[in-house]
Image (cartoon, grey):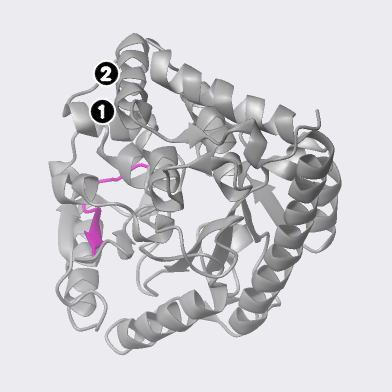
Amino acid sequence: MQNVFENPAPWLAGHGPHEDVVLGCLGYLSRNLAEFPFPERCDDEERRTIEDRVRQAASQTHLFRDAQYLAADDFPPYGVRFLAERRLVIDKAPTLMQGGGVLVTRDFSAALHINAQDHICVCAMAPGLQPQELWALLDRVDSELSTELDFAFNKRHGYLTASLGLAGTGLRLMAVLHLAGLIATQQFVDIERQVRERRHTVDRPWDAAQNGRDGICCLSNAATLGSSEQGLAFEVAQLASEVATRERAARGRMTEDATRRVADRVGRALALARGARLLDCEDALDMVSSVRLGLALGLLEGDDMQSLNSLLVEAQPGHIQAGADQPCDDLTLSMLRADLFNARFQRGPTVKSPTKYSNRC
């Protein structure tokens, strides 16, 4: 767990296709063993048997051959939430039962979740917009695991999963987007409607971001039944690319019509980050969103996308508690989060001089 905490999430590296709008892509592939009921219906002995079989099969795959295993029994109280914030497990508030655990690759770019909602959930991630590349990686892992394990499959319904929304391919692909421009120009509701019409969803990646003020959201396929994996990857790539184009257009209008207002928003966010003594998670995410927008628009000096992307995760409760190595109440979380932001922004970045951009209000 400490190794994961001390290393930045690879999918937040700040590069890749459409990196100014798309923080990264996440892929999750769910599978179940044919001879066992779903994990919630298994007893402890059955889950232990599943755990042993999956770990043995995973050790034969190229991706998880040298992975580290985090067993449920060894998790601190905040451990599962921490992994969910890092997106190494699919659920926002997952549970790990007896016989559960997570295999994490040495470079922290993929994980295999055992005995949560399904017997197996393979997670892979990449910076920028790369859903098709993620599917290719997941497909290889799936093929390697299937040589050792018999998956629950129905000719009519495809792969069987504990969630009806995943039945069929068992694949969920997500693009994590920063849509501050569309929210500021009041176009986000229209984007949500168009996404739903195309059988996709827009959701928040973290519980602390439910109000959507920060503009960080996940675009993902809403269903898998009746679609091919390649088709799902193409659709996510196409739709996320279209949304990214709309976001850039919205940002362009913001700088044309009110550059000084945007610079003021960024400057206020930096001032609060440096001076706050208590900071809740929603305010922290909103501040990072504003600073990231300023960097994307060329209004800032002395910062980079990777560190700002990582801060979106580091501000989450599970990561704050992992840093403190103990459970924390809300007040302590706010104090530690404020200290994190004070230290992070004390020496930079800075908003460019007004002479370097338009003075229009």
- For residue 256, say whether it is visible: yes
Quarter in which the C terminus is drawn: top right
Badge 2: residue crowd in 10 Å (few <14, some 14–19, many ≥20)? some
| Cα separation between marks 2 and 1 | 6 Å
Q: In percent of the image, x 81 and y 32: which residue is there?
A: 360
Residue identified by numbered label 2 = 328
Secondary structure beneath dot 2 equals: loop
Rendering coords of residue 8 (x, y %): 29, 52
Look at the image and say whether residue 98 sits in the magenta stretch: yes
Counting from the top left corner in percent of width and height, residue 308 is at: 44, 43
Labelled pair 2, 1 in contact (Cβ < 8 Å): yes
Q: Secondary structure at mark 1?
A: helix
Residue 81 lies in the magenta-colored region: no
Query: Which secondary structure class fits the magenta region best?
Result: loop
What is the number of the mark on residue 128? none
Residue topped by disc 1: 321
Residue 220 lies in what quarter of the image? bottom right
- In the image, 204 versus 338, the foreground residue is 338
The residue most toward the front is 355
